[in-house]
Image: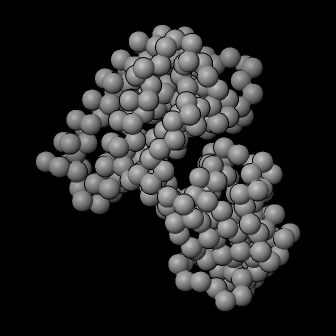
Amino acid sequence: MTVHPSLQNYADAWTHSIESISELVKPLVEGEWNRRTPCPGWSLRDIVSHIIGMECEQLGDPRPIHTLPRDLYHVQNDFTRYMEMQVDVRRHHTAPEMTSELEYTVIRRARQLRNESRAPETMVRAPLGKEQTLERALHMRAFDVWVHEQDLRVTLGQPGNLDSPGALVARDTLLDALPKVVAKDAGAPANSAVVLDVHGPVEFLRTVRVDADGRGSIDGAPSLGPAVSLAMDWETYYRLACGRVRATSVADRIKVDGDQDLGAAILRHFAVTP
């Protein structure tokens, strides 16, 4: 039995990114595992530990019994505390322990996906003791591993895969959150439009429209009179939307035409990942 057709895209994207991560970390020597990454509070080791932990949870493995230190500044709520557990429990693992556990986990997960026969709407494990559909779970794993692959690439100075299958999943995931950013968080006025023009390895133009009731929606049709237009390259877009950089630090890579105050408000709220 193979993966359901509606899940195949996510399975392929996950496979591409997770195999790339394995290749990136395989040659690392002990000291390199502690290098700081763009992901707030996490080293290379921490990112790989997070990936291992989340994939193990999808396999049904029990969560570790572990007490977190009190001085982790980036752990500020229940969600980040939940995520940190799988990370902190591996902070003293050696390089061979990390690579071997990652390899074993990838083998197990790949086998699980090859034999997946459940329907996409099947409810499965989610963080914080919640549940989500199998389709949502695999979608989020494909998104998560691509973003963390890019964290590793930035840290190691090995750019690549900005147009991979995972990049396209990331594009769609981040765009789904944009109407809320524009309409609710940034407070774009009713009956207005905001245009986002992204170029580079992944190119797209999207318009967020705010209706008379202040609700946002997104489509691919251009707007003749947008309140503001934002233009940037794909790498800048994903890094902003994933909270890896602030707009002030990449201002030279962003062009804002129209209402400058609204443009600034949108960029202040651009990060949509937890």
Quarter of the figure with residue 221: bottom right
Residue lying furthest right: 261
206 sits to left or right of 71: left
* Residue in front for this viewpoint, 220 or 50: 220
For this view, does 85 lie left or right of residue 76? left
Rendering coords of residue 16 (x, y %): 35, 43
Q: How is the image coloured?
A: one colour
> Could you tell me residue 273's position as x and y percent?
61, 49
Q: Position of residue 133 (x, y in %)?
A: 38, 52
Judge from the rendering whether residue 146 lies leftward or rightward of residue 85; answer left or right: left
Residue 190 visible in this rendered orientation of the protein:
yes
Residue 20 locus on image (x, y percent): 39, 36
Quadrant location, the C terminus: top right
Mark yes or no: residue 186 visible.
Answer: no
Which residue is at the far bottom? 224
Identify the residue shown where x is 53% and y is 69%.
204
Q: Quadrant of residue 58?
A: top left
Look at 67% across and 89% down and name the residue there.
224
Residue depicted at 62% across the width and 70% down the height: 197
- The residue drawn where x is 51% and y is 41% is 159
Please state the total of marks drawn on the protein image: 0
Above or below: residue 130 compared with residue 193:
above
Q: Nearer the viewer, residue 138 or 230?
A: 230
Position of 172 relative to 3 (above/below) = below
